[in-house]
């Protein structure tokens, strides 16, 4: 009998160490990028909710990528560059104890080349006064529509009331409002992330370069970074603040989602399994098919998300002796010469090589895809484009012809700029998308439900969270 008793005890002990940890919370948040990390802080500290934040990377911050150059010890941001002074942005930095200042700017000598051939292109960007005038017209034409999509589609009009301007291909909008001279700037700053920008719907170009951005460039608004020039500092502060409520290097492997609550089975990179029981679920990841796999979408969710198309963006830091120190070499189709501003590279494409300054040999490079592009494919594109630029004599051959392109850092930002067609929008796509809020006890934040700017997503969360907790 005594032997039997100790057998039971040891079996229970083995089972107890083997059983997954169970975490019970008011809200589980999936994704610790801009929208998820901000929501986690607000839910915990302002709404007094118990939370758990599940993040697949080994840090918070999503598209923020800060790299330390081992040669110089300097820090370089090759993902998010700066924040628009929009809505709660400055107050949030202040609250997290991260002082901010004006972004530093590298002044780079621009050169233009068609990366498909490597040949230089005699491209002339618009004169500054013309660019500013066009940007002003762009702002005037779009400011009346801002209420419909910023900081989210909360006031989006009924399908038959959608302003036709927002559904125009961007090139038509450009002609209609005579804003050609702004196109180069829109594309080079953030518009390129949309992919085929000249054919994209104006609504989605505005999601990449909208009125707040126009105001910043017209001197009517501001942008900033942490004064340490380490953008990741914000998310490090958030991580410290949230402590053990953050599960890093962890993904949901399967789930049961209902109106009454959620059971999420998670696994971390070190193989640890946990079960999360949560009353509400906040999804802060892009609803791409791959991301949604463990969340067993139902028919309604599936039918909305399947209408989304998306572009992909990758960013890296490279070094090669042929690249021009203090310069930027910009991918520009030959047909864009001398000033056909609507002729833009089509995805998949390498955007440009920008010297990162600070006495370094580092260049930031961006790759945009029309769909899924592997890291290997993106890096091969960079390698091939550089080889073409050298072979065409646009960049000098080096004394050491075997000098290799070095990839010092790389980030695959995956799918973003999720968009639907004009037909779907006229069929009530946004209404169907927003009808998912609260269904099956699940709430949605992030770029697909708003636009691709961190501060605007925080303002979007400020609207969403009270609705979620009502
Ligand atoms: C190169 C680049 C530069 C940019 N520059 C700027 C800029 O200067 N200023 C600006 O305001 N915006 C910038 N943006 C856009 C901005 O970063 C995004 O709009 C914003 O980060 C989107 O926030 P999000 O919360 O939707 O997604 P993200 O910030 O991408 O966060 C999603 C998070 O979820 C995690 N995740 C993904 N899948 C899972 C999963 N299955 N389980 C758990 N976690 C998961 C990811 O690792 C990530 O941390 C830039 C974007 C890129 C790509």
Image (cartoon, grey):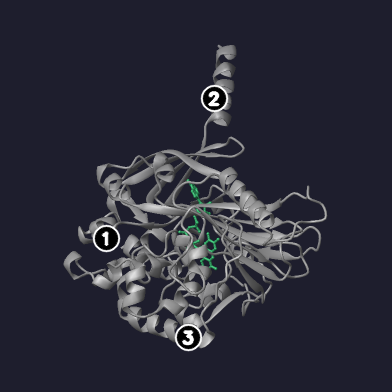
Which one is closest to the eye, mark 3 or mark 1?
A: 3
* Residue at point 65%, 50% (across, down): 383
Distance of label 3 from label 1 (alpha carbons): 31 Å
Q: Relative to residue 365, is residue 159 drawn left or right? A: left
Nearer-N-terminus badge (2/3): 2
Residue 54 spot, x, y in % from top left: 50, 49
Instruction: Answer with mark 2 or mark 1, whichever residue precedes in sequence.
Output: 2
On the question of residue 282 being in view, the answer is no
Q: Which residue in the structure is indicated by mark 2?
A: 12
Residue labelled with disc 3: 130
Residue visible at 34% across and 43% down in the picture: 257
Q: Is residue 347 above or below residue 120?
A: above
Which residue in the protein does label 1 denote?
Answer: 422
Distance Cα–Cα, label 2 vs label 1:
60 Å
State which quadrant residue 434 falls in: bottom left
Tell me if mark 3 has few (under 14), some (14-19) or many (20+) residues whose alpha carbon lies within 10 angstroms of its own. some
Check the picture and name the quadrant holding the C terminus: bottom left
Is 268 in front, or is 109?
109
**Residue 124 figure quarter:** bottom right
Helix, strand or loop at label 3? It is helix
Say which of 310 and 13 sits in front. Answer: 310
Tell whether label 1 touches label 3 (CB within 8 Å).
no
- Quarter of the picture containing the N terminus is top right
């Amino acid at each position: 009998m005594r032997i039997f008793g100790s057998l039971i005890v040891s079996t229970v002990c083995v089972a107890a160490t083997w059983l997954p940890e169970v975490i019970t919370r008011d809200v589980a948040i999936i994704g610790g990028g801009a929208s998820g990390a901000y929501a986690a802080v607000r839910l915990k500290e302002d709404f007094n909710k118990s939370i758990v934040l599940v993040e697949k990377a080994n840090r918070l911050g999503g598209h923020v990528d800060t790299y330390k150059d081992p040669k110089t010890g300097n820090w370089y941001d090759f993902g998010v560059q700066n924040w628009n002074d929009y809505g709660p942005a400055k107050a949030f930095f202040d609250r997290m104890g991260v002082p901010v200042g004006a972004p530093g700017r590298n002044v780079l000598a621009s050169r233009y080349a068609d990366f498909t051939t490597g040949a230089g292109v005699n491209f002339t960007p618009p004169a500054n006064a013309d660019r500013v005038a066009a940007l002003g017209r762009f702002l005037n034409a779009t400011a009346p529509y801002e209420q419909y999509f910023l900081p989210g589609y909360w006031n989006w009009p009924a399908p038959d009331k959608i302003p036709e301007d927002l559904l125009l291909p961007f090139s038509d909008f450009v002609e209609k409002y005579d804003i050609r001279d702004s196109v180069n700037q829109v594309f080079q700053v953030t518009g390129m992330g949309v992919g085929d920008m000249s054919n994209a719907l104006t609504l989605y170009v505005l999601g990449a370069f909208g009125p707040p951005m126009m105001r910043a460039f017209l001197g009517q608004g501001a942008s900033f970074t942490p004064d340490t020039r380490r953008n990741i500092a914000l998310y490090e502060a958030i991580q410290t603040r949230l402590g053990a409520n953050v599960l890093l290097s962890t993904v949901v492997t399967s789930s049961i989602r209902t109106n009454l609550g959620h059971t999420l089975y998670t696994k971390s990179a070190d193989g640890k399994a946990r079960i999360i029981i949560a009353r509400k679920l906040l999804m802060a990841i892009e609803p791409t098919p791959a991301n949604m796999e463990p969340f067993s979408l139902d028919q309604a969710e599936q039918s909305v998300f399947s209408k989304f198309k998306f572009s992909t963006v990758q960013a890296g830091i490279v070094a090669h002796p042929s690249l021009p120190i203090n310069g930027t070499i910009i991918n520009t189709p030959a047909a864009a010469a001398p000033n056909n501003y609507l002729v833009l590279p089509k995805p998949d494409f390498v955007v440009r090589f920008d010297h990162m300054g600070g006495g370094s040999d580092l260049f930031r490079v961006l790759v945009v895809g029309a769909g899924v592009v592997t890291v290997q494919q993106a890096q091969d594109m960079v390698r091939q484009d550089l080889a073409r630029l050298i072979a065409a004599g646009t960049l000098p051959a080096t004394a050491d012809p075997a000098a290799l392109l070095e990839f010092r850092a790389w980030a695959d930002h995956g799918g973003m700029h999720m968009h639907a067609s004009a037909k779907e929008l006229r069929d009530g796509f946004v209404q169907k998308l927003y009808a998912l809020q609260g269904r099956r006890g699940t709430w949605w934040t992030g770029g697909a439900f708003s636009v691709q700017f961190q501060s605007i997503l925080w303002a979007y969360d400020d609207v969403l969270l009270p609705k979620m907790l009502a």
